[in-house]
Amino acid sequence: MKALSCDVLVIGGGPAGLAAAVSAREAGAEEIILLERNNELGGILPQCIHTGFGVRVFGQDLSGPEYAWRWIRRAREADLRLLSETMVLSLSPERRVIATNSRDGLLEISARAIVLAMGCRERPRGALSIPGTRPAGVYTAGTAQRLVNIEGYMPGERFVILGSGDIGMIMARRLTLEGATVVEVLEIQPYLSGLRRNLVQCIRDFGIPLSLCTTVTEVRGRDRVEAVVASQVDAQWRPIAGTERIIPCDTLLLSVGLIPENEISRMAGVPIDPVTGGPYVDQDFSTRLPGIYAAGNVVHVYDLVDDVTESALRAGRCAARFAQQGTKERGPGVRTEAGENVRYVVPHTLYAEALAEEPITLHLRVRQPIERAVRLEATLGGRVLASRRLRYVRPGEMASLVLPSEAAPHLAAAREGDALRIRVIA
Amino acid sequence: MPSELYDVIIIGAGVVGSLIARALARYEARILLLDKASDVGEGTTKANTAIVHAGYDAKPGSLKAKLNVAGNALFDQVCGELDVAFERCGTYVVATSPEETATLHTLYERGRENGVPGLHLLSAEEMRRREPAITPHVAGALWAETGGIVDPFALCYAAAENAVTNGVRLLLETEAIGWLKEDHRIAGVITNRGLFRGRWFVIAAGLWADDLLHRAGLDGFAITPRKGEYFVLDREAAQQVRSVLFPCPTPISKGILVTRTIHGNVMLGPNAQDVTDKEDLRTTPEGLEEVMTGALKLVPGLERRHIIRTFAGLRATGNTGDFYIAQPPEAPGLIVLAGIESPGLTASPAIAEYVVEMLREAGLRLAERRDYNPIRKGTPRFADLSDAEREALIAQDPRWGRIICRCEMVTEAEVVAACHAPIPARTYDALKRRTRIGTGRCQGGFDTPLVLNIMARELGLSPLEITQKGGASRMVVRHTKDPLQGKEGER
């Protein structure tokens, strides 16, 4: 078996992995290896041929392939060792990776620090247990996006889209432009699960109906999908009898959620937060295993690639520092806690020393939408350490709150068990 | 033009028909195996509980009891010869009340009467030690050492492949629609592909056996499709389930069980619901709820978030309560296998031998072939290999190093091998059953576009021609617009 060693090993060559590798190089890491299972870099971006990428990072509204290309070019300039079509088979807590590809056979890579950047996957039909038959023509929105935008094939002619996730809405527009009919978009929740801008640009501008509080309760068809039955649901998502509608279609696209891909993390025993589906991380995106960092959607699913890039830049930089300096003894840190109307907060743990060096951005998702001005507040032992006014909060749109460095002494003075509580005040 | 004369024509290439074909392939005989579907095993074989039963359920003296126990004993040999995954992990019937422990005693006695070896009554404490996630209400259990789990698809296609390499002719997408009678004897089967003449006809058509009997003028036997619905859970759930857990049985079914599968997933089901349509494979909200409720009674810690798939299968339940395996005197030339519901999979190797003996006694000359090879070697599964074995394969063929299905770790080499196997995988589902591609937690989300291209390349087709399961089940329907021409692609 071929043996390699490096300072920083990045697993995944999507936007998170590329940014982490580039920033590890900028932070002085020497040998950097990036593993990508696909035959091209960029992750899901090459199939995202719409715009909306890079407004914050580059100050320009780019398409997915353009955004990916900028980072691929930086990665090439950074002189990384890029191994494409390489799949990780195992990861140990001691940071030894076994990987395979057609050229090298099996590779054993020992790394001083690792950045997990495997991204996320789509929730499939089975996860929803939609009753009915199992014909051809049920796809996740991302699979359909790859078929259309990369392979050049249409998965159907008449679509119903279940779920108002961003990829689903973007595909509604894309399929319409390709001459197909998108009959309807259905969303089980009483509110949108993706970004409002996609509702406007992809659904309303094309006159596609969106039905909230509605789900698919049956798939019909023997060989190919022939129809779906849509039903309204109550507040507990239970279908309401008598509201069934048969919608003839040949394809059902699912855009019902993304799940961080942490199979490799689990192999190493990285502790995973059941709410986010990603590793517990501190402000440096260090997981609870020393030297193993996590970047981008593997931690929690972001709305915007710009956020993925920014988080990964920090993860890569901190991984490089770990590779150079090793572990520092430190206490348990201060835990963050999801308060009123907050579903989760990332990072999960904060250290006063790190906050003293630079401000920390907290990312969070709310539970319920509030369509009027609210205040977001972070308190520790009754003291407000940061607060911000927002015009609205929506579950489909990640909110953030910056904790200033001035708050570091309060963090340092926190007693064991104290948590930084983040809440939405309506 | 007179058509070729076969010695035996088997109608139905499920696990039973395929094992019969293989059992006959060891003799100098012209054998034809027909199935109306696009792959072997597309009926009850592909959707069942995948358990090798010990044999304590069936009524003593019944054909079910006899063939279950005999079939169970053959599994090590058959699966060894055919390279099929099988594990005698043992099965448990779990009592959850003191009243139910009486049922355990009944089953234990019945099992002994049926000749089942290795049955033991266990205390609640012992059961908790063996399956820590079991319900706290456990009151005792019946442990059957000889029970196990198997890959039923693999048993079917491996048997059919071995039959084909030993000279059996297989015709798929060939549906029997009637019979040719000559001199009061069945002399041929009429299909959508024409007439096939033979001396003997074995009906192994599962749910459709009674229809074929009706067409031969025999009306006594009727099959009611009895639906069973299932959940498949992610491997993560397998930490809670080590073997096979049955509840105490009811008069119509063995109950909703919780089982580890041979591939390391957990499966829950089935319920039992009589339906009228032999193609009604719909899952229903009520049925799925019933299954989940039943499973939680055995293992309360199961989590819905681990669900990756639901499906339904149909049992070919006959009206006699037993397997019906006979040569109806009204239709000489026919051998009928009907009502082969549970424990049909377990019994299938014994059924095959039973049918061979019936044919021999009926006068079919069965001379052993000198070149018969009972061994069938499957393609290795990359996921199951050691690192050294993996390296050796990649060195031989780099396609072993290209992973196509990340959840189940299936390589391009495995996909290619399945496309060129003795019975080639020509549909996505056929490929899935052979390689496990798309059966993991992403359910094909990542692999589908890659697989379409590889299958098209290997089978010499366009991706537009690749179907999920034959018929009209195309996966993609047309090209996207041509950006240079500005018009829609060819349909």
Image (tube, grey):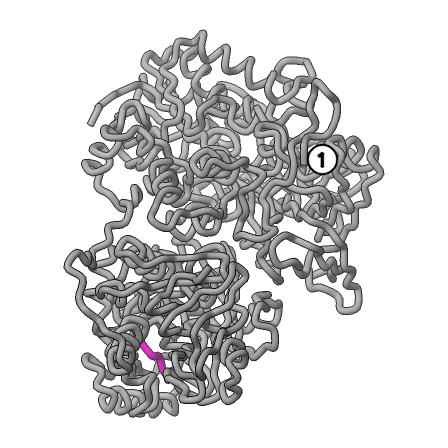
Residue A346: image location, x then y, percent: 54, 36
In depth, the one of B297 and B89 nearer the eye is: B89
* Amino acid, disc 1: Leu
Residue at the limit of the structure toward the front, as seen here: B1
Residue A299 appears in the figure: no
Residue A250: image location, x then y, percent: 69, 49
Residue B88: image location, x then y, percent: 24, 67
In this view, A379 is above or below B62: above
Q: Secondary structure at mark 1?
A: helix
Left or right, A8 with respect to B174, comes to left
**Res B201 → quadrant:** bottom left
Left or right, A228 with respect to B157, comes to right
Left or right, B86 with respect to A215, comes to left
Residue at the limit of the structure toward the top, as seen here: A77
Magenta stretch bounds? B91-95
Residue at point 30%, 28% (across, down)? B398
Residue A14 appears in the figure: yes
Residue B18: image location, x then y, percent: 35, 64
Residue at point 79%, 64% (across, down)? A243
Which residue has dot 1 on it? Answer: A175
In this view, B232 is above or below A332: below
Residue at point 45%, 84% (across, down)? B184
Q: Quadrant of the C terminus of chain A?
A: top right
In depth, the one of A122 and A40 nearer the eye is: A40
